[in-house]
């Protein structure tokens, strides 16, 4: 494999936050069911069924009566035109927007890397997405540099918070996530760099912790991965109904 040079180009990169499908439609959640569907009453009174792009439990977020924001598609092949994007949550300090679409984090981080906004991952001029590695897995982003070598980056969407200011992961048992940690650790043993990125789609987070009570096996796998040399960083997003922007890193505690 020929890796790209680590020399940065002379052209300046202009960073723009990820624009959400506009305009988002505001409504009230009636119910989430079958994991992938949600009934919503839009502010104009229309009742719609939206797809829910999130396989987790969405603990504390799928509460009937919550204010939600939906995007809509004009694709004639889609069974459901609307997609659930955001929900308002309040832990006693006022409402905050939370992103529940797990399809956004990879794009958000890729855009931030192109703009050199993630200090821990600068110096890699090229990257590829969804590259096969490990045992029948695909890495979210594979960063490449002739001098630095390969850096395997796995990305997890974070939206759980049970205490104001503290984001948590995971929100349900995740065997897949546990497997990813083990495979990142193997990449380190093979001589590469590996980074676990927790992308927090809620602007009220001041730190991140593992929800070890939700999935003790994931917590143990995280500890083993860190001991093996896997790096972990948490990045908080600034949220609005118009755009999502990776704001800044927050510490990982506990």
Image (cartoon, rainbow, N blue to C red):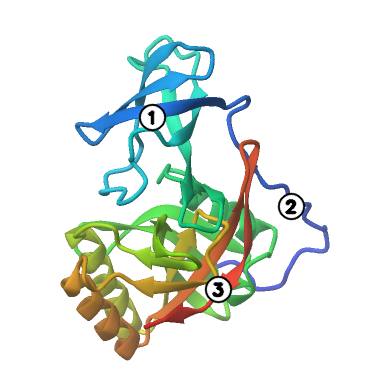
Residue 15, numbered circle: 2
Q: Residue 176 lies in what quarter of the image?
A: bottom left
Sequence-wise, which precedes: disc 3 or disc 2?
2
Sequence-wise, which precedes: disc 1 or disc 2?
2
Residue 247, numbered circle: none
Residue highlighted by disc 1? 29
* Image coordinates for residue 31, horizontal then vertical, percent: 29, 29
Which mark lies nearer to you, 3 or 2?
Answer: 3
Quadrant in which the C terminus appears: bottom left
Residues under numbered marks 3 and 1 in contact, where contact means CB atoms less than 8 Å apart: no
Badge 3 crowding class, 10 Å Cα cut-off, few under 14, some 14 to 19, many 20 or more, is some
Q: Residue at x 52, y 55 (%)?
A: 202
Q: How far apart in space, not on screen, are marks 3 and 2 (Cα)?
A: 21 Å
* Image coordinates for residue 125, horizontal then vertical, percent: 63, 65
Residue highlighted by disc 3? 250
Mark 1 element type = strand
Residues under numbered marks 3 and 2 in contact, where contact means CB atoms less than 8 Å apart: no
Q: Residue at x 54, y 48 (%)?
A: 95
Q: Nearer the viewer, residue 52 or 110?
A: 52
Q: How far apart in space, not on screen, are marks 3 and 1 (Cα)?
A: 30 Å
* Image coordinates for residue 252, horizontal then vertical, percent: 45, 78
Sequence-wise, which precedes: disc 3 or disc 1?
1
Q: Is residue 219 above or below residue 93?
A: below
Which mark lies nearer to you, 1 or 2?
Answer: 1
Any part of residue 154 in sight:
no
Which mark lies nearer to you, 3 or 1?
Answer: 1
Q: Residue at x 39, y 74 (%)?
A: 209
Mark 2 element type = loop
Q: Is residue 107 above or below residue 176?
A: above
């Amino acid at each position: 494999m020929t890796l790209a040079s680590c020399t940065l180009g002379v052209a300046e990169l202009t960073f723009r936050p990820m624009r959400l499908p506009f305009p988002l439609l505001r409504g009230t959640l009636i119910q989430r069911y079958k994991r992938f569907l949600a009934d919503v009453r839009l502010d104009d009174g229309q009742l719609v069924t939206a797809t829910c792009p999130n396989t987790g439990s969405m603990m504390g977020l799928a509460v009937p009566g919550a204010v939600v924001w939906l995007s809509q598609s004009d694709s004639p092949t889609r069974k459901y035109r609307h997609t659930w994007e955001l929900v308002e949550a309040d832990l006693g300090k006022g409402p905050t927007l939370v992103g529940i679409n797990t399809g956004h984090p990879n794009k958000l981080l890729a855009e931030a890397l192109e703009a050199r906004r993630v200090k821990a991952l600068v110096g890699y001029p090229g990257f590829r997405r969804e590259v096969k590695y490990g045992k029948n897995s695909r890495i979210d982003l594979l960063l490449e540099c002739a001098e630095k070598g390969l850096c395997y980056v796995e990305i997890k969407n974070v939206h759980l918070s049970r205490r104001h200011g503290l984001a948590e992961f995971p929100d349900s048992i995740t065997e897949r996530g546990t497997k990813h940690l083990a495979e990142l650790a193997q990449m380190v043993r093979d001589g590469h760099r590996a980074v676990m990125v927790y992308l927090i789609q809620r602007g009220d987070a001041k730190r991140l912790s593992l929800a070890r009570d939700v999935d003790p096996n994931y917590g143990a796998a995280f500890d083993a991965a860190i001991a093996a040399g896997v790096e972990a960083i948490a990045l908080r997003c600034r949220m609005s109904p118009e755009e999502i922007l990776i704001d800044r890193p927050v510490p990982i505690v506990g």
